[in-house]
Image (cartoon, grey):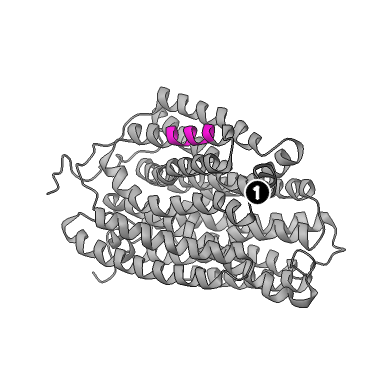
Amino acid sequence: MTRTLDTAPVPAPSRDRLALDEVLVITVLALSAFVMILSELAMGVALPQVMDDLGVTAVAGQWLTTGYALTMAVVIPASGFMTQRFTLRTLFFATMGLFTLGTAIAAAAPGFELLLVGRIVQALGTAVLLPLLTTTAIRLAPEGRRGRLMAVTTAVPAFAGAISPAISGIVVAQLSWRWIFIVVLPLAVIALVLGGWKMRNLDAVRAVRIDTVSLVLAAIGFGASLYGLSAIGESHGGASLLTAGIALVVGVLGIAAFVARQRRLQRHSHAMLDMRVFAHRDFSLSVGIFLAMVMTSFGLNIVFPLVLQNVLGLGALQTGLLLIPGGAAIAITAASVGRVYERVGPRLLVVSGAVIAAAGWALLCTVTRDTPIGLLLGLHLLISIGLAFMWTPLFTLAMGSLPPRLYPHGSAALNTLQQLGGAAGIAVLVTVLTLFSGSHASGSGMSLDGMRATFIAALLLTLISAAGAIFLPRHAGATSADVPMGH
């Protein structure tokens, strides 16, 4: 029997701006998220060096990224429960403490097994802190300033994700893979100390219990789905497709069972992830557009560097340097979009962003081996700016369309689908790249034809986002927070 100590979290009182201590809370959470995302995505570039140094195969080495993603996919759905059951200060110390511990283990790991343990411990912290940042930001945001605050919560992780492969490439080229963790470790410690100094609790907790069956079903459903999608991407269209297909079938069945159980439990407010978030039109519509967008966003971070190096012949250092301006453009653009969100509304911003990104993908289809690096840089900037135009409004509209009691569940759903959408995007684009390279492929298995087909696939996904964005509300205040579909 669940005993409630307090009612659902009380929304912040109506006011024009955040109090200083609230600003510090958001700042500490955002900086922590930046450090976590920086570490999460850095390992992909460093994998070849790790495999050589530790003497492991590519199949084993991929588990440093796959294991991280699987842990995220399994834990994130439970984050909604955790944010209700534990105080903000407790959750922050637990998540940041786990991440710091994992980083230290990875930095000192003498072999592959301990390095993998360190990565999984890192992921346990990251999986809860990212939804915690979103939930806290939307709960504290004053009316009329949601766009600005959500811009911070989306721009900081997006910026970290965009520059992470570049920084990793530079570090690995000059030092060794261990320095990725050595550089991140003091940043994590600083965030932990700042949190100890300034983090405070915002709401009373509720004595809710986790449903063990839901936890198992989430692990099977989301874990198997993400493993299947990752296996497709990591195999580059190879022989492991049967294994990936079986995993996807198991994953889909697991997710279906998980959803059915949540619908049954939510009648008594016992759901681990309340499915009623999808009963709100603007949330469901935003999530649909967001999924198509995040597929191209993750594809840009993973497939674009592959193409630059294996098709166009750029070096790792050149590729890393070329990607950094795009990360800066994301942060600057997202901050600007956040400032105008309440005035302009989500529809214009998302449609404009999709058109800008689509133009970038279309122009990339014309690239050849003789294309100047300056033009490649410009097109990468164009796509990055377009995606930044979309990310903040979609997150803000989705969360703002929910009543406060569903904020934790909405954040958990968004972050879970972001992981699955990202893995799906990488799987789709890498498969297209491999299949269409055909007989013209270089030693890497990639060709100009495959590159163009991949960019066309990204273009189509972006156009789907643009089409869906037409149905978004014109004004920021026109949400369905109190009017679920069917009521």
Magenta portion: prevailing SS class: helix
Is 348 or 373 nearer to us in this picture? 373
Is 429 or 103 nearer to us in this picture? 103
Answer with left or right where residue 105 lies relative to residue 396. Answer: right
Q: Which residue is found at the position 33% from the left and 69% from the top?
A: 256
Is 186 or 215 nearer to us in this picture? 215
Q: Which residue is found at the position 23% from the left and 53% from the top?
A: 211
* 433 relative to 30, above or below: below
- Asked whether 124 falls inside the magenta stretch, the response is no
Q: Which residues are magenta?
A: 96-105
Q: Which residue is found at the position 35% from the left and 29% from the top?
A: 200
Q: Position of residue 348 (x, y in %)?
A: 53, 62
Q: Quadrant of residue 58?
A: bottom right
* 137 relative to 257, above or below: above
- Asked whether 97 falls inside the magenta stretch, the response is yes
* Residue 293 in view (yes/no): no
Mark 1 highlights which residue? Answer: 47
In this view, the residue farthest toward the top is: 197
* 214 relative to 143, above or below: below
Q: Quadrant of residue 7?
A: top left
Answer with left or right where residue 446 lies relative to residue 138. Answer: right
Q: Which residue is found at the position 66% from the left and 48% from the top?
A: 51
Mark 1 packing: few (<14 Cα in 10 Å), some, or many (20+)?
A: some
Q: Position of residue 292 (x, y in %)?
A: 52, 66
The three-letter amino acid code for the residue at tag 1 is Leu
Q: Position of residue 273 (x, y in %)?
A: 30, 56
Callout 1 secondary element: helix
